[in-house]
Image (cartoon, rainbow, N blue to C red):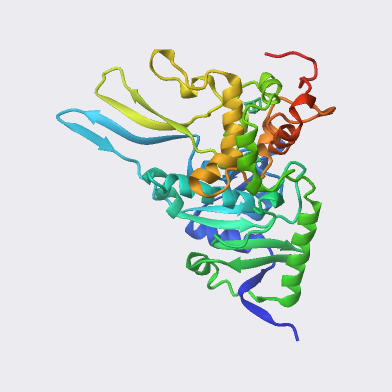
Amino acid sequence: MVKSTPRALKLENLNILIDAVSQKYRTYGPVAKDGENAWEEVKADGELSLGCAATMLPAKHILQPVRLDLYSFKSSGGFQIEEPGFDEKIALFGVSPCDVNAILALDRVFGGRFVDPYYWQRRENALIVASNCTESAEESFCTSWDTGPELYSDYDLLITELADGYLLEVGSQRGKVVVNGLNLPGATQEDLKEKASRLDAARAATKKRLPVPPDDLHQLFEERYDHPIWVPNAEVCFSCGNCTFSCPTCFCFDIRDEVKPSRKEGVRNLEWDSCQLLEFAEVAHHANFRRLRIDRFKHRTIHKLSWMKQQYGLTGCVGCGRCVRWCPSWPVRRGRITSLADPVEIIADMLEPPEKVEGVERPGGVIV
Ligand code: SF4
Ligand code: SF4
């Protein structure tokens, strides 16, 4: 006899769940837009683009928008501050396992020594409906970090596509409240087996892998900090920042005050920043801690792949492949055209014996 499990349910179609979620939360999900996927507000499953095709910007940008007005201020008979408040209940519907792992890394950053109340107001009000990846994207290497294709915890609800519907797993009280009253049948042992075999197939299809175990990366970068391959790599970098803006674990931002001409009122806002931009590390008198492009290129790479783990205890790379996809520089390395920002390729570069390092060229040869 086929048994059902208490926490796993069967869902015929996603509309049932989207309806239930959007009654309680403003719901965002990945939506196909201009040939790519973007996080947008969703109301029905026809709009959703699930699977392993990563959105151009990660789910993080709903929690920490590209630009956010934090508060307005006024000086008339005293100094007044007005905060818009970020207590809206939001749901992130269809977050991939790697993006959930990236959110956990951001939680460490914004909840560590310095707690960011603006991030946490949104985060604590966010329902995470994660979606296991039953396919593999060419650029992703999540299996190297064990950040995908399967999520094991840290979700409110988790869906996995099956041949005849979805497996729905409940991971929190908040998730339980959403599905209560939907009268969904329990999942069968066959459903659970199908989930396992689909995820095994997705794992096997993820061919791209880090060339060394993640635990060895710190030592690798320590030993090869001055490896000669950094030079030609950095020479074909545009310093555009795409690799950081598209990365789900990058967290740097700038704070600006926009003051009206009256000088009596204004707005304080937050805007994403990038360590790849020349001005990022500039201080007074145009002193700049990372004026050289090679220093900025190295900084991103080593921070993602090693230092973030040292600082926060969680990897700064979850293998989503966005930096690979969105880097505009595709130089020739080891006789192949590869994405300059690709962590897998950069580590392969570091493994080259220094005496064997050859120039890295950008096809067309133009270096800007
Ligand atoms: S470094 Fe690249 S592959 Fe790693 S999480 Fe960031 S964008 Fe994804
Ligand atoms: S590595 Fe690529 S995406 Fe990153 S700053 Fe350089 S050119 Fe831009």
Residue ranking furthest to the left: 77
Residue 367 horizontal/vertical position (percent): 71, 14
Figure check: 153 above or below 28: below
**308 sits left or right of 152 in the view:** left
**277 sits left or right of 228 in the view:** left
Residue visible at 22% across and 34% down in the picture: 80
Q: Nearer the viewer, residue 95 or 74?
A: 95
Q: Quadrant of the N terminus?
A: bottom right
Residue ranking furthest to the bottom: 1
Residue 109 horizontal/vertical position (percent): 46, 45
Residue visible at 64% across and 72% down in the picture: 9
Q: Give the image quarter of residue 149.
A: bottom right
Q: Give the image quarter of residue 202.
A: bottom right
**309 sits left or right of 118 in the view:** right
Indicate which quadrant contains ligand 2.
top right
Residue visible at 71% across and 77% down in the picture: 188
Q: Is residue 34 visible?
A: no
Q: Quadrant of the C terminus?
A: top right
Q: Is residue 40 visible?
A: yes
Residue visible at 37% across and 43% down in the picture: 114
Figure check: 261 above or below 138: above
Residue 53 horizontal/vertical position (percent): 71, 45
